[in-house]
Amino acid sequence: MPQGLNSLAPRNSVYHRAGPGRTGSSAGLMRAFVYLGSMAVSAATAAAFGAHASAGGPHRPAWSTLGAGALFLLPALFDRGLRHAGAPAHSR
């Protein structure tokens, strides 16, 4: 269930925010960045574990993920356009 919601939420937001002429390119860009993100996370996990997995190994990627999440949260908090995200286009 969570994986399905993690997949549907960004896709629905792209379809809602992108115009009819940009839906395909926006969905393609979203998918490309999902793949790039997964490769970056794989590389960070490999760097954190090194040659041997240990009990402290998962903490390094967890802290870096928490830091990245905080950095991505800041622009979202100050984006005034998100206040009207659920409103119909004619009321903006």
Image (cartoon, rainbow, N blue to C red):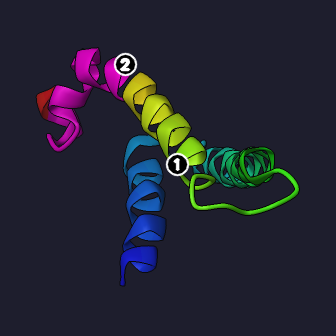
In which quadrant of the rendered image does the N terminus lie? bottom left
Q: Residue at x 29, y 18 (%)?
A: 79
Label 2 vs label 1: CA separation?
26 Å
Q: Which residue is mark 2?
A: 75
Q: Does residue 70 appear left or right of residue 51 in this picture?
A: left
Q: Main secondary structure of the magenta part?
A: helix
Q: Does residue 17 appear left or right of residue 60 in this picture?
A: left
| Residue 32 spot, x, y in % from top left | 74, 49
The local secondary structure at tag 1 comes to helix
In which quadrant of the rendered image does the C terminus lie? top left
Task: Write down the quadrant of residue 89 in the picture.
Answer: top left
* Closer-to-camera residue (89/60): 60
Q: Is residue 17 magenta?
A: no
Q: Residue at x 24, y 29 (%)?
A: 82
Q: Are there few (<14), some (14-19), or many (20+) residues within 10 Å of tag 2?
A: few
Relative to 2, is 19 above or below?
Answer: above
Q: Which residue occupies the extreme right position in the image?
A: 51
* Closer-to-camera residue (65/26): 65
Q: Which residues are magenta?
A: 73-90
Q: Residue at x 83, y 50 (%)?
A: 50
| Residue 78 spot, x, y in % from top left | 26, 15
Cβ–Cβ under 8 Å for marks 2 and 1:
no
Relative to 90, is 55 above or below?
Answer: below
Q: Which residue is mark 1?
A: 59
The local secondary structure at tag 2 comes to helix
Relative to 12, is 84 above or below?
Answer: above
User: Who comes first in sequence, dot 2 or dot 1?
Assistant: 1
Q: Does residue 45 appear left or right of residue 77 in this picture?
A: right
Q: Are there few (<14), some (14-19), or many (20+) residues within 10 Å of tag 1?
A: few
Task: Write down the quadrant of residue 84 in the picture.
Answer: top left
Question: Three-letter amino acid code at disc 2?
Answer: Pro
Question: Three-letter amino acid code at disc 1?
Answer: His
